[in-house]
Amino acid sequence: MASEKTFYLETFGCQMNAHDSEKVIGTLRQQGYRQVESEEEAGLILYNTCSIRDKAEQKVFNRLNDYKALHKAGKRFGVLGCVAQQEGEKIFERAPYVSLVSGSASYRKLPEMLSRLESGENRITGLDDRQTEETFETEFTARQNPYRGYITIIEGCDKFCAYCVVPYTRGKERSRTSDSVLEEARRIAGMGYTEIQLLGQNVNSYLDPEGKRSFAELLLAIAEVDGVRRVRFMTSHPRDFTKDIVEAIDAEPRLCDHVHLPVQSGSARVLKMMAREYTPDWYLERISWIRAAKRKISISTDIIVGFPGETPDDFIQTMDLLAEVQYDCVFGFKYSARPNTPALTMIDSIPDQEKSRRLQVLLDRQREVQRANYSRHLGEVLEVMVEGHNPARGQVTGRSSQNKPVNFSWTDPILPAPGSYLQVKIVATHPNSLVGEPI
Ligand code: SAH
Ligand code: SF4
Ligand code: F3S
């Protein structure tokens, strides 16, 4: 094996995982590793995995299987993330060529685990027992996104919704101090990031361990950091959604006018079976706070259809809630049974075909809502942050403060840089994007 230490890392799953990978890459570089673009080139092959739906663990084993011949050539394999935490040492039984299995709650031990790996040890594990209070903070984060700086402010989840693996894969809910979050925000604003996105499975469940700032106060403090123009946060949980978040957005234009507030179902009965700990009325009260803001705040959500026991009438109630809220974006999912979760013991008797039908009905209806919502932007001038270019179409792509994609044509040979801001007049609208002209 060459003396140079190289790694390949592939990431699956949510934004938290993507940002964890930025921290893992930074940590590996700090340990003298160089990142390469393919499994074949790498000495160490890592998969940062997701387990949220659809037999995700099987996909990871398939991927490992595809490349297992590389083991004979001296390459080492590591499984990170939610499948690693969920399957634990079982991974070594099914894929004996794997040397390292680590869940996200153990990443702060990565340097130690890497040196054990280098000294030839096998079957190294970093598995969480839902005890740790520590968060993974590192100054070596290798930010991959050129225009949006992610900062995890809270890790884990204590909510235990009946269908969800996250409390088992990401450990106990624990927050960073608001001082350390602010310090990181200042550091990355100093690097030129003007948009900061705060992350957490339930970002608004944030509790400053030092008690200095509430979540809303932290939002305001970040918006005031020199150089910051946009602050986003994902995902908010209805249970912990407080009025002061809306007041903060109202008071501070640098806080983006968008809230992602997953409802999951419009039926009180289903919400109860899901253990979401709120009713549709309770959720709609939070929506009414957001609607009462002086700024128009965009709202998006997640919905699960076909949860065990969801009747056609329950589903109609979800459709009614959708009609009432008129979301700007809906992520709809068919329920899928996941290991270790309480819903696994409920009878999942709705045929897949019926789940697909409900999902299609929901997405079709939502498309019409969005067609109407997006068309209201016609003629408006929006500030757009440039995200990239589509050379084939001669187009620049970006996002409005409300997180809506905006595309516009660009003829000048000098393209606007990702992360720059332009004023764009909206001249056409689609259900999922806006079309504009820079002014
Ligand atoms: N913490 C956030 C959501 C995190 S998971 C919240 O509670 O709102 C992201 C989304 O995946 C969830 O909102 C849910 O809609 C979906 N999801 C989670 N587990 C699922 C499962 N077993 N089947 C289908 N969808 C699921
Ligand atoms: Fe999963 Fe519920 Fe926690 Fe969200 S709040 S991560 S859905 S258990
Ligand atoms: Fe997937 Fe884990 Fe995120 S299960 S969605 S990577 S928290």
Image: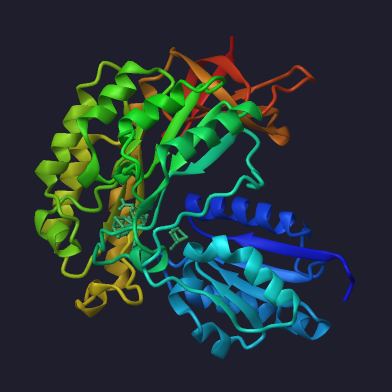
Residue 194 position within the rendered picture, expressed as x and y whole percent measured from the top left: 57, 26
The correct choice, above or below, for 320 with respect to 398 in the image is: below
The correct choice, above or below, for 242 with respect to 1 in the image is: above
Q: Work out which quarter of the rendered image holds the C terminus and state it.
A: top right
Q: Residue at x 59, y 28 (%)?
A: 189
Residue 394 position within the rendered picture, expressed as x and y whole percent measured from the top left: 70, 28
Residue 177 position within the rendered picture, expressed as x and y whole percent measured from the top left: 41, 42
Q: Quadrant of ligand 1?
A: bottom left
Q: Residue at x 62, y 74 (%)?
A: 63
Do we see residue 356 in this rendering? Answer: yes
Q: Residue at x 61, y 67 (%)?
A: 47
Name the foreground residue: 45 vs 379.
45
Name the foreground residue: 360 vs 222.
222
Residue 395 position within the rendered picture, expressed as x and y whole percent measured from the top left: 66, 28
In the image, 252: left or right of 197?
Answer: left
Q: Work out which quarter of the rendered image holds the N terminus and state it.
A: bottom right
In the image, 100: left or right of 332?
Answer: right
Q: Residue at x 49, y 49 (%)?
A: 15
The correct choice, above or below, for 8 with respect to 78 in the image is: above
Residue farthest toward the right in the current orientation of the protein: 2
